[in-house]
Image: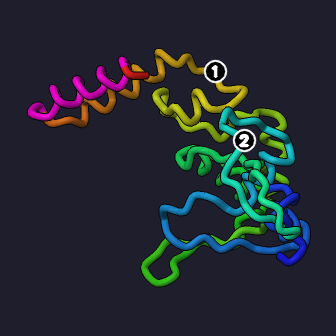
Amino acid sequence: MLSHTDRSPAYDHLHRMALKGAIHISIGGDVVGVGTTHVAQNLLKLKQKIPKYGLNYQNQSGDVVPFEINWVGGCGAGFPKFFPLYEAAGGILARGRIGNAESMITDMGKTLEVEMKTLADNPSFFFCDNPGCTYCRLSWDFSTGKESIVLMRRFLKSLRKQKPKTLFKSVGSWLRRRRVA
């Protein structure tokens, strides 16, 4: 960790850990990552349509400089698509429970290898199956969703979840936001 600087690529420490044979322990059923997917995304230079700037910070020389965001993310609903591939490659070392929590131990080198090959062949492999997911359908350079269709699907899905009493408020609020934007 001491070698990580403001110029280091995002997830560099996880990449170095994977290269050294580290394991990753996921505790809790809502944890869907294994510590290497973002490493693969960065190494393959997958680009996300997000602002590349952040807050200003004071560097080691004492200068105040802008922080440039150099990482990408992903939709948590899509990452479990990798699990069968990890399993086939021997990347999942154990599954079980720690206390009452579902848990999994993975070989970071093997999971990174699987992700590098899979994402090189299909960069959108980790996209979820929700056609209204703005994150998967709109936020990547290689996203293929059309904004009007994705947003309408998302809106309609939110309407189905509304109670009839609050539906009118929800529609009015959405229309006001669209007019302002």
Q: Which of the pair 117/139 is nearer the observer?
A: 139
- The secondary structure type at the circle numbered 2 is loop
- Foreground: 6 or 36? 6
Q: What residue is at 36 percent from the left and 17 percent from the top? A: 179
Say whether disc 1 or disc 2 marks the residue closer to the N-terminus. 2
Q: Tell me the quadrant of the picture where the N terminus can be found.
A: bottom right
Q: Does the residue at mark 1 contact the one at mark 2 (Cβ under 8 Å)?
A: no
- Residue 175 belongs to the span the image colors magenta: yes
Position of residue 53 measured from the top left corner of the image (x, y, whole percent):
71, 44
Query: Could you tell me which secondary element the residue under label 1 belongs to?
Result: loop
Residue 60 percent across, percent down from the top left: 85, 70
Instruction: Check the picture and name the quadrant holding the C terminus.
Output: top left
Front tag of 1 and 2: 2
Residue 115 position, x and y percent, is 78, 49
Residue at 35%, 26% in the rendered image:
177
Q: Is residue 111 magenta?
A: no
In the rendered image, which residue does mark 2 sit on? Answer: 52
| Residues in magenta, as a range | 164-179
Q: Which residue is mark 1?
A: 144
Q: Is residue 144 above or below residue 18?
A: above
Image height check: is 131 above or below 113?
A: above
Image-quadrant location for residue 93: bottom right
* Residue type highlighted by circle 1: Thr
Q: Residue furthest front?
A: 63
Can you tell which quarter of the image residue 23 is in? bottom right
